[in-house]
Image (tube, rainbow, N blue to C red):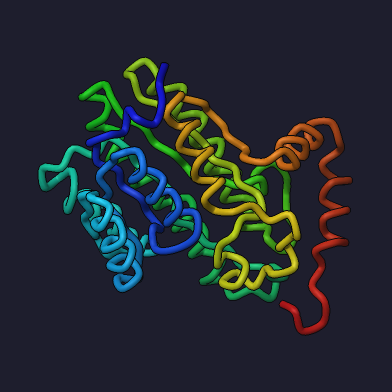
Amino acid sequence: MANPQDFRGKWALVTGASAGIGTALARELASHGANLILTARRAERLEALAAELRGRGVDVRIVVADLNDPIAPQQIFDATEGAGLTVDIVINNAGLGQYSAFHESPIEQEMSQIRVNCEAVVRVARLFIAPMVKRRRGWMLVVASTASFQPVPYLSTYAATKAFDRIFALGIAAEVARFGIKVTALCPGTTESEFFEVARAGRFKRRSIQSAEEVARQAIAALARGQRTIIPYFNGRFTALLVRFLPVTLITHVIERAARPRTGEA
């Protein structure tokens, strides 16, 4: 039976590895013997994580790149697979969001979410899956969100990009399964990370917040066994089921009332 020990000795690329779920996923893969390629914008954070993992006997490479730049995926590929490393595991994790009334949000912030959460995910997947198909071996995790199951007013672009990620992962999973490649969509809910501060979405941070380590543990186990979708907590699974039976207009209305920014909040 497939298990995370299958990752031992293989190279894993983790985008957005400098914080939150990305860092936790890198540590989880390292605990199963994978070698790591860490990529993100912040070199100092990557260096700190690399030093920690190397101290545990893990082979680690760093590629500093900003996935808001359309050429970054190719740069990452050229520095890894293109330079002779066989990348068997791709963790498409990098992402960003912005809590705001859409008509007040800077348009560049909205477009950055589309570039990082959608365009970069597709570019990275296209570059690295093609060699996997030739080798008839590989794994890819795409980090979506429980926000992907319904519209989320005031996180409208973010939720839409995560719906894209989830559907994209499921489609690719069906395409490449016959080549021995496993693709999983990870749909975390409220998770310990700096997302809420960066996105100014603190009001979405619930008391029942899940640790990034627990999300990563469940995600890597699901990826190893080829599970197409993983929602790593019960309330998220219940919500994803519930929205299939309730009118989307009702769901959106309730979320809008609850999430509407207070004066000075967004």
Residue name at image x 39 percent, y 63 percent:
18
Residue furthest out toward the bottom: 264
Quarter of the image where one finds residue 98: bottom right
Q: Give the image location of residue 112, x and y in percent.
A: 48, 64
Which one is nearer the viewer's eye here, 218 or 67? 218
Residue name at image x 49 percent, y 28 percent:
171
Q: Is residue 42 left or right of residue 61?
A: right
Quarter of the image where one finds residue 34: top left
The quarter in which the C terminus is drawn is: bottom right
Q: Is residue 20 left or right of residue 53?
A: right
Which one is nearer the viewer's eye here, 183 or 249? 183
Residue name at image x 50 percent, y 36 percent:
168
Q: Give the image location of residue 195, x and y in percent.
A: 57, 65
Q: Is residue 113 above or below residue 221?
A: below
Q: Is residue 214 above or below residue 195?
A: above
Residue furthest out toward the front: 56
Which one is nearer the viewer's eye here, 23 or 249? 23
